[in-house]
Amino acid sequence: MKVSTVALVLSVDSGLPLLVEALHDEYEIEFMEIAIRSGQLNALQQIHEHRDRINKQENEFGDYVEELLSQPFLRREIQTHGVQWLKSKIKIEKYQKTENEAVQVISDYAYNLYKNDPGRTDFFLASPMSQIRIRIFVLPSSVAVAPNSAKLA
């Protein structure tokens, strides 16, 4: 059974923990952990910038494929590969949407557990079919972040 991880990034304002974001990408979680351990205060901003760069690259490539497919005289092989890529992109986006919805539900539940017991910073949620590791990262109060109601990765 594969264990997935969801990390809640919290900020403490007036003694109350606020959910800033839920991470579920293992590389983002690892980056956040290393950054917090080393005292780096802008880790979340760097994650957002990285996501923006990747999104921009994917959009540019998607635009290129669409432009290529709109050309009137296109080799059949190129057209077939372009259409396959577009179909794959649609499937991936559908999967990511479902995954983000699941992470939202999980993070809301885990956030409520954390509010009831702030000592729980690394725990598991389990069902007969899956296990989810929950990690809690609390940003220092000096870091000004606006809660995004668990903006998802």
Image (cartoon, rainbow, N blue to C red):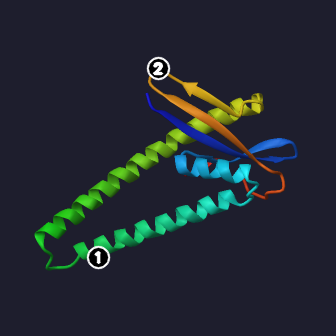
Q: Which residue is mark 1?
A: 67
- Residue shown at 54% from the left, 24% from the top: 126
Which amino acid lies under the numbered mark 2 shown in the image of this protein? Pro
- Residue shown at 33% from the left, 50% from the top: 91
Q: Is 55 placed above or below 39 here?
A: below
Q: CA distance from mark 1 to mark 2?
A: 47 Å
As drawn, the residue found furthest toward the top would be: 128
The image shows residue 16 at horizontal and vertical percentages of: 82, 41
- Horizontal side of residue 109 vs 59, given as left or right: right
The image shows residue 29 at horizontal and vertical percentages of: 59, 47
The image shows residue 122 at horizontal and vertical percentages of: 67, 33
Query: Which of the 4 image quarters holds residue 118?
Result: top right
As drawn, the residue found furthest toward the right would be: 14
Q: Callout 2 environment at 10 Å: few (<14), some (14 to 19), or many (20+)? A: few
Q: Is residue 25 visible?
A: no
- Horizontal side of residue 125 vs 88, given as left or right: right
Q: Nearer the viewer, mark 1 or mark 2?
A: 2
- Horizontal side of residue 38 vs 132, given as left or right: right
- Say what secondary structure mark 2 lies in: loop
- Say what secondary structure mark 1 lies in: helix
Q: Which residue is mark 2?
A: 128
As drawn, the residue found furthest toward the left would be: 76
- Residue shown at 16% from the left, 79% from the top: 72
Q: What is the number of the mark on residue 117? A: none
